Amino acid sequence: MNAVVEDTCESVEDVITVGTHVIVKKQDFSKIYKVSENGILMLGKNQRVEMQEIIGKPFWSTFEMVPLSGNKGTFTLTLTDEIEPWNDLKGELSGCDNRSITDDGTSQRLSKEEILQLQEAGKTGKEIISSLIENSKSFSAKTEYSQEKYIKKKKNKYFKFLTIHKTSILLLHEVYFKRKHEKIGGLRMDALAQMLSYSDVQSDGLHLLYSNGFQGLPAAAMINRIGTNTSGYLINLHPGNMPQTTFIEAMNFPQELRDRHLAVNIYSFLRLHYQGESSIIDNISKKVVIKDTEESHDTEKSSEESEGETMNDEVSETDMEVSELETEIKENGTLLTSDTGEDNSTLKRKLESEEPEIEAAKLKKPKKSANKLKWLLETKRAVDLLSSMKARGLTIVAKEHPLQIAKALLPFLGISRPFVIFHAHREPLQETYMELKQKRNVINMKLFTNFLRSYQVLPNRTHPDILTNDTSGYILTGYLVE
Amino acid sequence: MSFKKIKEVIEDGDIVILYLNPNNMHPLEVKEKISNKKGKIIDNVFNTAYGALRVVSLIGQKYGSKVELTRGWAYVLQPTPELWTLTLPHRTQIIYSPDISFIIHLMELRPGSIIIETGTGSGSLSHALIRTIRPSGHLYTFDFHEQRVSIASTEFEKHGLSDFVTLKEKDVCLEGFGEELKHKVDAVFLDLPHPWLAVEHATVALKKAGGKLCFFSPCIEQVQRTCTKLICEGFIELHTYECLQREMNVQYKLLPILDLECLKHKHTTEDIHKNRKEKQEEKLLTVTQSHSLPGHTGFITIAVLPPTYARKKEIHLQCRNSDK
Ligand SMILES: C[S@@+](CC[C@H](N)C(=O)[O-])C[C@H]1O[C@@H](n2cnc3c(N)ncnc32)[C@H](O)[C@@H]1O
């Protein structure tokens, strides 16, 4: 196999290396994993997979999970060529006539021991599931929908092959949308795709984004469209201490591209732009004496958010830096509110209790003054960039009411350039629509929602998928004019 | 050159979008003279419901500014692929922005992607594809219709996009995509009546490291046939979708309010008068949906071709036999 691999690997990029994030697929199930020397991947609650084997192998490789003897629930991986065809399982088995079948409650004829024997005899997952189905009296009486669910459940249990893939926005989005859609605000792929069009994001120009939460998905998707070795910039305004960066980390963007992504607090940004640098410095020192209402509001908000994100997959070092910066500001002053201290320790506790494979962010103690400088410099860079040129597009993906955000950021958008706002609810967008319309410097405004349906396509059995998602959210688009 | 980079001021030769209202937009080519339907060279004057516009008078004006018409005004915008899709001259049926966005997302395009599109048609999709893949990527677009190819070619030239696109006149089902594209592309998009006839050619054009194939078909039979073919060629993870965008009109609605409480007791006429004045209507901000909207555009199917070393060889052979 190695010879073949060498022949077709077009670059080192096609090989799995330590430090990168990858997608691990096991059937329909997929998970984000950061490759490390002795990494462990948890599948569900009780399967630990030792992942060393994947290092140095090409992407798309398939590995078999081999139980580690004497260590229940732990598996090692071996590279394999064998790929079981699975697509046809339902087709083969559910087409039969069920007139003779009556369900008497004892549906599975195979005993536990018999199933175990099958496994030990080295039967493949597909073979085992086929026997389970053949010996299930109730299977054929089930609706197609519940047959699907049954097979899916069994597959998760008996399928023992993993494949490793490069991360991409599409795959990362899928991981989240399937299992943790609330963490990305229910943002469905058709809405995400449309935002990327209507914002006119591309390799060139300065792109402005306001986004709060969503694990950094909107920013990562835009950075992806700005692309490596191009001239585009993304300024990503957010309301808290630290933007969420899970998706950005997981995309393994090269440093050169990451340097063109400026994540800046929106309050600091606007203050610096309108009031100049001295007011920022003033504000930092003031903040520790009397709690600035806005800013303390943010702090509360972001700690509240990290409360909701107990399972945050990745907590990057940058996040930690910023939160330490915040602590530092407070420590330097005279007033150290007790609740802030508490928030910070809960945050750290959470970080430490991360799932093991995530390799909880190493809590480095960075140089404090350097950090403060970095944060201020970043804000200055954003302000400078936006005073040298207007934004090519404005994108707002908010949980907040978008009206104030739109009003504050439209002045930074170029004339004749588009904006797009996504919101889970229609009402705030209606209100934004009306207000902006009355201001008369915005044209071609459109409010819409999307319907997305997926299909099962099989010979003679094509129909819409039984399960669909109805949380499309709403999108408002328009163009700024003089 | 209106699509190449952001422009502030309108120049000779630009394409501008004249905006009257959301349902009334027109692409204008900024030049002194144009040829009319009979091929005669005449002054470039554009007539709207609000009066005429001498198109050259736009030169030197800012994009996004208001322009006077004899009986009103309009705005001029620099075209984006979205505006272009809404205003371009149709030579064929075209794909619209909601489907286009979805196609680009599913094919995972980004700057640097090398891609094939067929047929070019009216170039609606092409403009959005080029925006996504430039500057380092390239679009190879094919159509077997001579006139469409030549019009599209002139358009790309005028729009400043020729560096990023190569147009070829070819029947791709019969001839394939050409030796020079063998194992060169990241993704193939098909919008033609017989997508299954182009699948084998697409497989050859995709990189050895694998790639994506996406096709757009209005009819489910085409989808079924093409999916069968794709599976035979070793494609996996086939998904078929349908995406509909529903536009809503934001409006204030006045809702009459009935006072039924007052009927429970006896009231003086004065009372009733007072109540009437108080509240008879409520102003509600809401939306109305259109009575008729496109209920179907086309099915979008995406499929993945794994790298050569991870392709399923057995299925491959099996299909070859039953195919004939
Ligand atoms: C519906 S149009 C494509 C529209 C295009 N996607 C757009 O958005 O503007 C289909 C095009 O495919 C071309 N076509 C059909 N069969 C073809 C073939 N075998 N080879 C090349 N082009 C073909 C037709 O000439 C037509 O222009």
Image (tube, coloured by chain):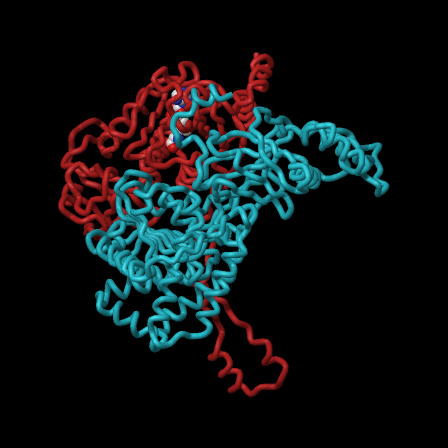
Chain colours: A cyan, B red
Q: In x, y percent, where is residue A116?
A: 76, 35
Number of numbered discs: 0
Q: Is residue B244 visible?
A: no
Image quadrant, ligand 1: top left
Q: Is residue B85 above or below residue A80?
A: below
Picture residue at 79% right of the left edge, 38% below the top: A112
Residue sitting nearer the eye, B284 or A33: A33
Q: Is residue A455 above or below residue A400?
A: above
The answer to whether residue A252 is left or right of residue A142 is: left
The answer to whether residue B229 is left or right of residue A389 is: right
Residue sitting nearer the eye, B161 or A27: A27
Q: In x, y percent, where is residue B278?
A: 47, 79
Q: Is residue A331 above or below residue A173?
A: below
Q: Residue furthest front?
A: A70
Q: Is residue B12 above or below residue A391?
A: above
Q: In x, y percent, where is residue A50?
A: 57, 39
Picture residue at 50% right of the left edge, 82% below the top: B273
Q: Residue furthest right?
A: A104
Picture residue at 45% right of the left edge, 63% below the top: B253
Q: Is residue A74 visible?
A: yes
* Quadrant showing the C terminus of chain A: bottom left
Residue sitting nearer the eye, B215 or A115: A115
Residue B116, located in which quarter of the rendered image? top left
Residue sitting nearer the eye, A208 or A306: A306
Q: In x, y percent, where is residue B284?
A: 46, 66
Picture residue at 27% right of the left edge, 48% below the top: A206
